Image (cartoon, helix red, strand yellow):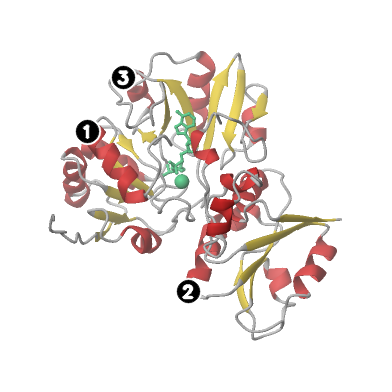
Amino acid sequence: MQKEVKMITKKIIVDQSYYNDKVKRLGEVIRAGGLVAFPTETVYGLGGNALDKEAAKKIYMAKGRPSDNPLIVHVADISEVSTYVKRILPLEKRLMEAFWPGPLTIVFPKKDIVPMATSGGLRTIAIRCPAHEAARALIRAAGVPIAGPSANISTKPSPTTADAVLHDMDGRIEFVIDGGDSLIGLESTVIAVENGKIIIYRPGGITRDMLEAFAPTELDTAITAEQEHPKAPGMKYRHYAPKADLSIVEGAEEKAPGMKYRHYAPSAPLTVYAGNIEAVESEILSFANKGKGKFGFFVSQETAEKIPAGNIIFVWGRRGNKKELAHNLFQGLLFFNNHPVDHIIGEGTDGGGIGMAIMNRLTKASGTHIINMN
Ligand code: TXA
Ligand code: MG
């Protein structure tokens, strides 16, 4: 039997001087086929050389992710894209110029230089240029594009801090660069351009309204559409699935097809109440004091103030402040790792602006257990 060597993941703290020796050294680790988790403005990425199929395999291993779920390739500048894609349409160019560096990922037909292992067997490749300086410094230091899925174990919430990365990845990767809290807190918007239309595969920080200003948009998130072959292949897998009923989910996939799209699982089943706010509040309050450790609350500050002391509460943020809600979303789902409860009672938000991305993640995290109160 092969002897197991336990790897220790080192946390490297970077400051404003990102172009320092530390980042240069980590670029070499990537080029040599190693894995380095890095901060971005959306969530932390699990980085490896996107042109090296062995590195791509290591990423899938570290995450426990099915190898047909493609990785996002990160570049440091728009000018790099043409090296990896067959064509760039004028609309794609305008979108890159408008939103890069930033939370927009575009799916292009790929050139052969990008291995199929990176694209999950697809002929297309998703590319984005992250806004976080440390991420771009790492890409430049590596001298290669960096494949970077979110740095969590497959089906768990995405990490927005270096410590959340370590929670899932300690011992599985060489380094994590600590660049502070991810500013946005939700993964990038994933799109493709088809026949002059922008198809949104995953809503994110760049909202539908922002994209509509460039071309007509269409949503194709495959959350409820039980497509045989979802266009964004990640969408067909469970994400963020509650630990407690995981076995039921696996056994019941055929009967409850929505379940297979769960991602971002918190440590207990989550039910989210959305819609009329008075009704939402009174429904949530009805769970308070039903026994300590039974229910945990993932609620706005306004609702939290009405929940009696002694309950386990994650104060999500101010109700109307969707930036704050987006920023705290994954930290909130991870909060219950350290505050065990049997069931999480959550509050939703409306689907306007970045609310669409927030509700998309909550829909998956709850396994579509969203109760609409009217
Ligand atoms: O904000 C982000 O995008 C973060 C940071 C680290 O950049 N990355 C991230 O990667 O969220 P990941 O692998 O967790 O999610 C990638 C998503 C998946 O839903 C995947 O199916 C989709 O992008 N995707 C990747 N390549 C694709 C392709 N060729 N066609 C359609 N969808 C693709
Ligand atoms: Mg992910």
Quadrant of the frame with the C terminus: bottom right
Where is residue 90 drawn, in percent x and y?
A: 51, 14
Q: Are marks 1 and 2 in contact (CB under 8 Å)?
A: no
Crowdedness near tag 2: few (<14), some (14–19) or many (≥20) residues, C-alpha within 10 Å: few
- Residue ID at (44%, 56%): 159
Above or below for 235 versus 23: above
- Residue ID at (41%, 53%): 152
Residue 338: mark = 2
Looking at marks 1 and 2 on the same chain, the residue that comes earlier in the sequence is marked by 1
Mark 1 or 2: in front is 2
Name the residue nearer the viewer: 279 or 129. Answer: 279
Q: Is residue 38 visible?
A: no
Looking at marks 2 and 3 on the same chain, the residue that comes earlier in the sequence is marked by 3
Q: Residue furthest right?
A: 374
Quarter-of-image position of residue 72: top left
Above or below for 33 versus 297: above
Q: Are marks 3 and 1 in contact (CB under 8 Å)?
A: no
The residue beneath circle 1 is 143
Left or right: 13 with respect to 78? left
Looking at marks 3 and 1 on the same chain, the residue that comes earlier in the sequence is marked by 3
Separation of residues labelled 1 and 2 (CA atoms) = 39 Å
Crowdedness near tag 3: few (<14), some (14–19) or many (≥20) residues, C-alpha within 10 Å: few
Q: Amino acid at mark 3?
A: Thr
Residue 83: mark = 3
* Secondary structure of residue under mark 2: helix
